[in-house]
Amino acid sequence: MGKVDYKHSKSKTDSDIRDLWQTPIELYEYLNARFNFVCDVAASDHNYLHLNYLTESYDSALNGWAHLKSGYAFCNPPYSNILPWVKRAREAADLGVGTVMLLPVDTSVDWFNQLRKLASEIYFIVNGRISFVRADNKQKIHGNNRGSLFAVFNPRSFGDCRASFIERDEIFKTYEKIKVNIPDPNVNTVWPKEVNRIFDSIENAKYLNIEAQTKVRQSINKMIMDRLPPAQLNNAAKILVDRIEAKL
């Protein structure tokens, strides 16, 4: 029998939320400041960190996220089945979409062996462990029994995967330095270029309030994922803007 995937060894967490942990905001913003994410591709309605996010109903592990066309996606996948996510991240990078993936440290399993072959860089977080946030009550839980790493799939990088190390305290110190300058995500969220292109083509869309603009962009992104024909997508987006305008 081959080596099994990571199965939450010795985990005392309720089974219904083990795959719904939220990344601590300090780590997410540390990475976001560097990569300027355009989507959170392994999220739920309770734990997303970017207003453009993909949930289980889309199934990123099955369908991938190359539709984003460009930019970097953030991915903290379910740890119960990591390998499909690693493969999708490589496929996305080959099509021009980068991914930064947060994962547990376990060098003995098959998904890690594949990761070191497919990723551009692997950063091991050392001298401390990451405390994740429960999706149900938003409480940070200490006592993580595994170390963490983040892997970068760079569309413009070729050759062997590079391994580096970063101290956990350095991540938190950097966050403290940059947090006052972090823009309001409801106002300054980075969206995929295709979403913005379609949004900008709709008359009066830019005059909607921020909440309405976000709703329109989310709808456009969903229609792109659903592979609506361009003419139908543009027409549906225009109708949505007209309806929102009528209600305001």
Image: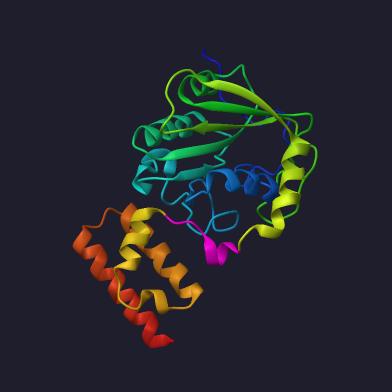
Picture quarter containing residue 101? Answer: top right
Residue placed at 43% from the left, 45% from the top?
71
> Is 163 left or right of 73, judged from the image as shown?
right
Task: Identify the residue at horizontal 74%, vertical 50% (top origin).
Answer: 177
User: Does residue 246 sit above or below 31 in this rendering?
Assistant: below
Q: Which residues are magenta?
A: 184-191
Q: Quadrant of residue 78?
A: top right
| Residue 99 image point, x, y percent | 48, 38
- The answer to whether residue 148 is seen in the rendering is yes
Residue drawn at the location 46% of the way across and 33% of the way down: 154
Foreground pick, 179 / 127: 179
User: Residue 45: percent from the left, percent from the top?
Assistant: 54, 58
Q: Quadrant of the C terminus?
A: bottom left
Its colouring scheme is rainbow
Q: How many marks?
A: 0
User: Residue 120 at x, y = what percent?
Assistant: 49, 26
Residue 186 included in the magenta stretch of the image: yes
Residue 31 in picture, x, y percent from top left:
61, 43
Horizontal side of residue 206 vs 1, given as left or right: left
In the image, 52 versus 140, the foreground residue is: 52
Note whether residue 137 is visible. no
Is residue 119 found inside the magenta-colored segment of the image? no
- Report whether 219 appears left or right of 160: left
Residue at the image point whose x is 57% and y is 62% from the top: 185
* View extreme (top): residue: 1
